[in-house]
Amino acid sequence: MKISLGLVAFTLLVVQVACAPANGNNSTTVADANKIPVPCPDERRSVRLLRGYSRSAGDHFYTTDANEMFNAINNYGYVDRGYAARIYPNQERYTSPIYRLWNSQIGDHFYTTNRDEVDDYIYQRHYTFENTPGFIFSTQICESIPMYRLHNPQQTDHFYTTSAKDRFYYVQNLGYQYEGIIGYVLPV
């Protein structure tokens, strides 16, 4: 009898987790291998992360501000490359800030969630802090996907993508080095 009650309780737990809505709108999704339900931030509060590229500067540029992207396109030679992902404009549960830095000497924007990297890039590599364009997840929860960071040392360019196919192509064909996952974002 004890085995039967334990089996029933386990089955109810599995059914409860498996049937939880997973649309990200104040729903509950499975956080990790421990199968702990996590209340997700409302994805309707997320915004699109815009991506631009300047061939002359050899620089990828990301922002959530359409006016800022418009200015980069019209005044600095960037080309609109569409949307990179969706991120939160404000701090939400389980999110971390993404920091944007700029090095005018080499023409490179650098993005990270790692505060130690911010300090290293400012004090050792002569970047300046520009802003915090938004907030992303530090772990893969709430139907988020990885955002990969790549670097091309010849062009001194950092490139960020959610596409494993693009990551592979940039590494195999364009001289970029894969530097890992910066964090987790919502798909466009």
Image: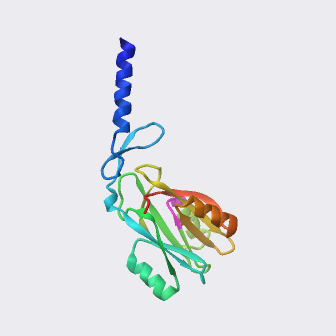
Query: Which residue in the rendered view is the most extreme toward the top?
Result: 1
Task: State the residue in front, 19 or 111.
Answer: 19
Position in image of residue 89 (x %, y %): 36, 65
User: Is 15 placed left or right of 76 in the picture?
Assistant: left
Task: Say which residue appears at 39% left-offset and 21% top-offset.
Answer: 7
148 versus 24 height, above or below? below
35 versus 109 height, above or below? above
Task: Say which residue appears at 31% left-offset and 60% top-offset.
Answer: 44
Task: State the residue in front, 82 or 72.
Answer: 82
Membership of 161 in magenta stretch: no
- Image quadrant assignment for residue 127: bottom right
Task: Say which residue appears at 67% left-offset and 70% top-offset.
Answer: 174
Position in image of residue 23 (x %, y %): 35, 51
User: Is 84 placed left or right of 108 in the picture?
Assistant: left
Position in image of residue 81 (x %, y %): 50, 75
Is there any visible trace of residue 168 in the rendered image? Answer: yes
Quadrant where the C terminus is found in the figure: bottom left
User: Is 166 placed left or right of 173 in the picture?
Assistant: left
34 versus 165 height, above or below? above
Query: Which residue in the rendered view is the most extreme toward the bottom?
Result: 75
Residues shaded magenta: 111-116
Tell me, what colour scheme is on the image?
A: rainbow
Quadrant where the N terminus is found in the figure: top left
- Image quadrant assignment for residue 88: bottom left
User: Is 137 placed left or right of 169 in the picture?
Assistant: left
